[in-house]
Amino acid sequence: MDAHPVLPNPSPPTATDVMAVLAEHGYRMTAPRRAVLAAVLGRSRPFTAEQIVTEVQTANLETGRSTVYRTLEILASVDVLTRFLQADGHPAYIVGVPGHRHHLVCSDCGAVVAFTRCPVDDLVRDLTRDTDFAIHGHLLEVFGVCPDCRDEPVSGMPEERLVQAR
């Protein structure tokens, strides 16, 4: 039996869950943090820090850009968010459940599927042995095209090539 199965995306944490985690780590729930938390938990797809800045500043002019960025990093540090690189190389976040996970990222629509099976474990063990590095973590994003995007015709691509691409 595989120790790290591929699992469907579980349900995201609630605001109450996140507030409890933040309190456990000594963070106060200020009004600006609540605004960021509400904006974050309302998203089921990946988002950038600037998208949250825009959303929060539209609703609450007292929440500054630096507060949004700090809050996102706090949420990532307590494992509520995962920070990852998109297909274009820019950072984004996704709400997740705590634990070691990696992501499949659709290069077309940005959909993300988390998975926990770690194909890098053996490589990390070998690198530790071969280099004497004390490796404390790694990231893995796998880019491709999701089933929904594959089913849409690609503009400008001849039908013959489109069939071969599938």
Image (cartoon, grey):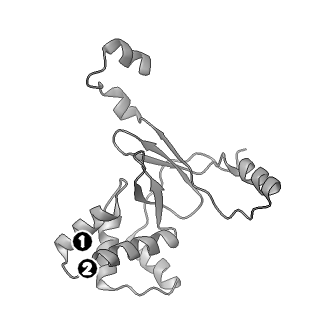
Numbered tag placed on residue 56 in the rendering: 1
Residue with the most extreme front position: 131
* Image location (x, y in percent) of residue 101: 57, 55
Q: Residues within 10 Å of mark 2 (few under 14, many from 20)?
A: some
Q: Is residue 104 left or right of residue 90?
A: right
Numbered tag placed on residue 156 in the rendering: none
* Image location (x, y in percent) of residue 23: 47, 84
* Image location (x, y in percent) of residue 121: 71, 51
Circle 1 — which element? Answer: helix
Disc 2 versus disc 1: distance between alpha carbons? 7 Å
Kindly identify which residue carries mark 2.
63
Quadrant in the rendering for residue 29: bottom left
Q: Residue at x 29, y 63 (%)?
A: 50
The disc labelled 1 sits on which kind of residue?
Val
Circle 2 — which element? Answer: loop
Residue with the most extreme right position: 129
The disc labelled 2 sits on which kind of residue?
Thr
Q: Residue at x 17, y 70 (%)?
A: 58
